[in-house]
Image (tube, rainbow, N blue to C red):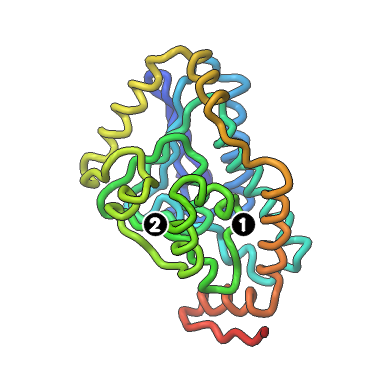
């Protein structure tokens, strides 16, 4: 498999696989663009599809987040352009007229966690791990996490996750409301997702689209724009670049900004 995403289809369900297992399915600009294009294509052209599944290649990660090799060295303007690409892809998922399931096996961190948050249903294996580590490297979640996470799990759990940058296991993710069903053994994950996807796909496409539209909570407008601007400034800052570099070099960051 050479493409950045792989697409398969069966029984009115289309599966999109993030195909960078050697990079823990990290999200670079090309992946984000391909993902956004595919989600829009389903909505606009593939009228026979009634459910989407997004998963990560390999057995280590759904997605470990934004590709640090791409954002390392970016100034604020280029960082903002990258973040807006992330918004375009993740907003396309949240606003999809076709229900989207996140199939999580392994790490869902940073931008990968935020991608998961935009999906309508989240099913995870019991070996999965979740977190927003941006605070540990002098940055902030920039793909909608500051907006979607408090709405999903509440203020207390959201701020604890974001401010500590810590990771939680699948049981804790279920307890705070990140998962749609309790975590399942990794060997059973694919079956659980396929069963759920087929059940969703048995519904009316129009009915499903109307349900999503009626239930959707808007994350458009000023809040996301403000998040993008702050995230870009964080990435471009001295401490942000030190955090990104230290993470790549597997050492503790030395922050200098007051």
Picture coordinates of residue 102 (x, y %)?
Answer: 42, 40
Query: Which element type, helix, strand or loop, lies under badge 2?
Result: strand
Q: Quadrant of residue 191?
A: top left
- Would you call the spot at circle 2 few (<14 residues within 10 Å), some (14-19), or many (20 or more)? many
* Furthest residue in direction right, as rendered: 77
Q: Which secondary structure, mark 1?
A: loop
Percent x, y for residue 134?
54, 66
Please tell me which residue is depicted at 60% across the width and 19% down the height of the picture.
Answer: 45
The residue wearing badge 1 is 142
- Does 248 appear above or below 150? below
Q: Which of the 4 image quarters holds residue 14? A: top left
Nearer to the camera, 203 or 4: 203
Q: In which quarter of the image is residue 15?
A: top left
Return the disc, 1 or 2, that comes first in the chain's sequence: 2
Residue drawn at x 41%, y 47% as measured from the top left: 56
Is residue 2 visible in the rendered image? The answer is no
Is the residue marked by circle 1 packed among few (<14), some (14-19), or many (20+) residues within 10 Å? many
* Contact flag, marks 1 and 2 (Cβ < 8 Å): no
Q: From mark 1 to mark 2, how far is it between C-alphas?
A: 16 Å
Q: Where is residue 133 in the image (x, y as percent from the top left)?
A: 48, 66
> In the picture, which quadrant includes the N terminus?
top left
Residue 49 lies, in percent from the top left, at 48, 20
Decide if residue 224 is on the left or right side of residue 253: right
Q: Residue 92 carries which label?
A: none
Name which residue lies at 46% across and 12% down.
204
Seen in the picture, residue 233 relative to 34 is either above or below; the reply is below
Between residues 1 and 242, which one lies in front from this camera angle?
A: 242
Q: Taking 49 as reference, is 138 above or below it?
A: below
Left-right relation of 205 to 40: left
The reply to whether residue 200 is visible in this rendering is yes
Dot 2 corresponds to which residue? Answer: 130
- Which residue appears at 38% of the width and 22% of the height? 200
């Amino acid at each position: 498999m050479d493409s950045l995403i792989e697409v398969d289809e069966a029984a009115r369900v289309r599966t999109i696989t993030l195909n960078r297992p050697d990079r823990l399915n990290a999200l670079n600009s090309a992946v984000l663009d391909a993902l956004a294009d595919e989600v829009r294509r389903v909505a606009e052209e593939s009228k026979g599809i009634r459910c989407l599944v997004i998963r990560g290649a390999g057995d280590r990660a759904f997605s470990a987040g934004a590709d640090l090799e791409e954002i390392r060295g970016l100034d604020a303007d280029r960082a903002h352009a990258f973040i807006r690409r992330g918004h375009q892809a993740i907003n396309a998922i949240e606003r999809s007229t076709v229900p989207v399931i996140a199939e999580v096996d392994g790490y869902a961190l940073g931008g990968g966690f935020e991608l998961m948050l935009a999906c309508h249903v989240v099913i995870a294996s019991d070996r999965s791990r979740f977190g927003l580590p941006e605070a540990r490297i002098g940055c902030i979640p920039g793909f909608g996490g500051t907006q979607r996470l408090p709405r999903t799990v509440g203020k207390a759990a959201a701020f604890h996750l974001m401010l500590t940058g810590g990771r939680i296991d699948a049981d804790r993710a279920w307890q705070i409301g990140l998962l749609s069903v309790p975590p399942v053994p990794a060997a059973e994950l694919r079956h659980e997702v396929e069963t759920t996807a087929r059940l969703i796909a048995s519904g009316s496409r129009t009915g499903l689209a109307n349900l999503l539209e009626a239930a959707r909570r808007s994350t458009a407008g000023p809040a996301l724009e403000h998040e993008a601007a702050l995230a870009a400034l964080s990435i471009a800052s001295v401490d942000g670049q030190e955090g990104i570099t230290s993470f790549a070099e597997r050492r503790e960051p030395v922050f200098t900004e007051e």
